[in-house]
Structure formats: C-alpha cells, structure tokens
Amino acid sequence: MSIDSAIFLFAFLPLLLILEAAIRPIRAKNVLLCLAGLIFYAFGELWALAALIASALVNWALGLWAMRGVKAAVVCAAVLNLALLGVCKYLGFLGEGMALIGVQLNLPAIVAPAGVSFFTFKGISYVVDACRRPENGSKNFFRVLFYFSFLPEVMSGPLSRFENFEGQLSSRERSIERTAHGLRRFILGLAKKLLLSGGCAILVDAAFSAGEALDARMAWLGAIAYSLQLYFDFSGYSDMAVGLGAMLGFACPENFNYPYMAKSVGEFWRRWHISMGSWFRDYVYIPLGGSKVNSTGRIIFNLFVVWLLTGIWHGANWTF
C-alpha cells in the first residue's frame, strides 16, 4: 500500500482521520498514529516491519548509551545502520563490482524493505544528536518507534529530526483550518504525482524506446520530460507527506523549494530534496571540516565524499 493507492485514499486515510478526530487525549492519539504507521508499513512485508522495529529498538538503545556521553555509540550506530542498508540494497551491486575484477561471489538477492534508506538515516541522526545534546534523545522507546514509523514519512521521507518531531508529541495544533490546508496540499501533491508526472512519463517512455528513430528534437523532449517527471513525482510525494502531516497536526519539513527556478547549480541543489541535503551537510560535510579547512583540495575532497555517498544512497547502480 502506498499513499497514492485507492485503498489508502478511500479506506485507510478516511478511517484514520475519523478515529484521530474522535480520540481526545493526545497520548491516545499518538498511540493510534504509531499503530497506523506500523500497520501501513506492514502492508509491504512482515519481515520489513520486523526490520523497522528492530532498527528503532537498536538505535533507541544506542541513543541511551550516547546520552551518557559515550561516543562509541555513534560509531556503532553508523556501522550497524549502514550495514543494514548495505545488506538490503547493495549486496547485488557488490557482486557486480567484484565480477569486474574477476572475483565471482554468490551473494543472495534481497528485496530491500520500503523506506530502508530513510529509517537508517533517521537512526544515525538520532544517535548523533543524542550524543551531541542528551536532551535530543529519549528514554521512552515508544517515542523513538513513533518517530521511525511516522506514517507520512515512513516510505520516502522527508528526513525529519527527532528533536523537532518529539516536540509535537505533547503539544500540536489540530484545527479545521489546518486540516483543510493539509488536505489541499495533499491533493496538490497527488495531482503532481499522478497527472503531471504520469503525463511526462508517456513522453519519456516514447523517447527512451525510440531506438534508431530517435532524433535531436525527440531526445531533448525526452530529457526535459524526464527532468519534470522526476520532479513532479518526488515533490508530489513530499507535498502529500507534508499535507498528511498537517491533517494530523504535525509539521513535516519541506523537501522542495521550486528548484527549477534556481539561478545557479548550487542554489538548485539547496532547493532540491532539502531534507536529504541538510542531512549530508550536518552529518557528513561539516564533520569533515566543510569549507572551513585550509586548502581548496580538502574542500573538493569533502564535497566529493558527500556526492559519492549521495549517489550510493540513491541506488545500487553505477549511473547514480
């Protein structure tokens, strides 16, 4: 099940909104929404749900360790989360890479759990933030599990921070006006994803399958349509996530800010997939020294590491 599927739009979501509005105590609302996120995620594979819960449990335990000032917890979080991500998404890619140098490995093909790239990064940021400032962690496992399984973000982000999420668990605005605003944002995202991205996909498929009949005009049309297809698909999902969060009283981070209106390449990337860019900035680029290093070569190296990891994170393919 996805948030643009018929079963979600016409059954799961209306029932969830009715129950959430009917329940008064905010703690009971939190329990309902956490269960809804877990049930929604379980529509994929039960083993994927087990992986999500296990990841939340391990990172919560490491967070407790980090809150005591033990920096080894950060190393463990990075190793364990990246190991889970690597096993789920990159075993086959590793086998292909080893084959290029003549080493044949019989590695199992594993279907990655939906959203694994997002909840593993949430785990790393949670433990790092708990180590930097203990008040950004939590001794309550339920709160961490709710953060990992939060319905609007569990499949494809955006990448929220625990400190911002936790602040809304005990106090948040829930009104008819906010719900209506969220619903409008959700519908806008749904239209971008199904109508605009879907329409562009028709042109893209025609261009990419043209073969020898492809000329310069069709190539440019296909390239532009593909750029728009990617944007409308992902920004549409992000709009739906932000809108769904608003309907439930939560403020989810924005993920896109009109990137194709940017005046430079740098500005474009600051406007595109904002939550991911800020994650790499705060947890990779700045810890490496960022731009406050003594040489241009080191700045280039820091940028190269960020973009290499960004490419790997997006998918197990040399094209990324």
Image (cartoon, grey):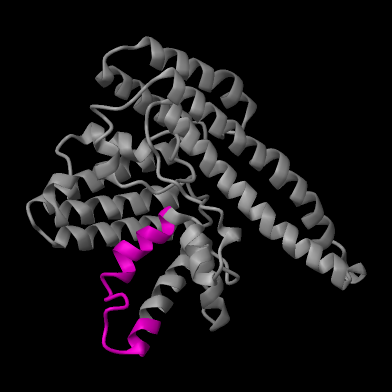
Q: Is residue 299 magenta?
A: yes
Question: How many numbered tags mark residues here?
Answer: 0
The foreground one among 106 and 98 is: 98
In the rendered view, would you say 240 is above or below 131?
above
Q: Give coordinates of residue 191: x percent, y percent.
A: 66, 36
Name the spot of residue 43 as percent of width and height, x first.
51, 31
Observer able to see residue 45: no
Q: Residue at x 31, y 47 (%)?
A: 161
Name the residue: 53% across, 67% down.
Answer: 93
Q: 271 and 36: which one is in front?
A: 271
Q: Is residue 133 magenta?
A: no
Where the N terminus falls, by quadrant? top right
Extreme residue in the top direction = 22
Q: Residue furthest left?
A: 68
Q: Main secondary structure of the magenta part?
A: helix
Examine the image and state in which quarter residue 69 appears: bottom left
- At 35% from the left and 28% from the top, the residue drawn is 34
Quadrant housing residue 83: bottom left
For the point 32% across and 56% down, the residue is 81
Quarter of the image where the C terminus is located = bottom right
**Outermost residue to the right:** 213
> Is residue 150 visible in the rendered structure shown here?
yes
Please state which of residues 284 and 107 is positioned toward the viewer in this rendering. Answer: 284
Magenta span: 275-300
Residue 260 drawn at (x, y percent)? 61, 59
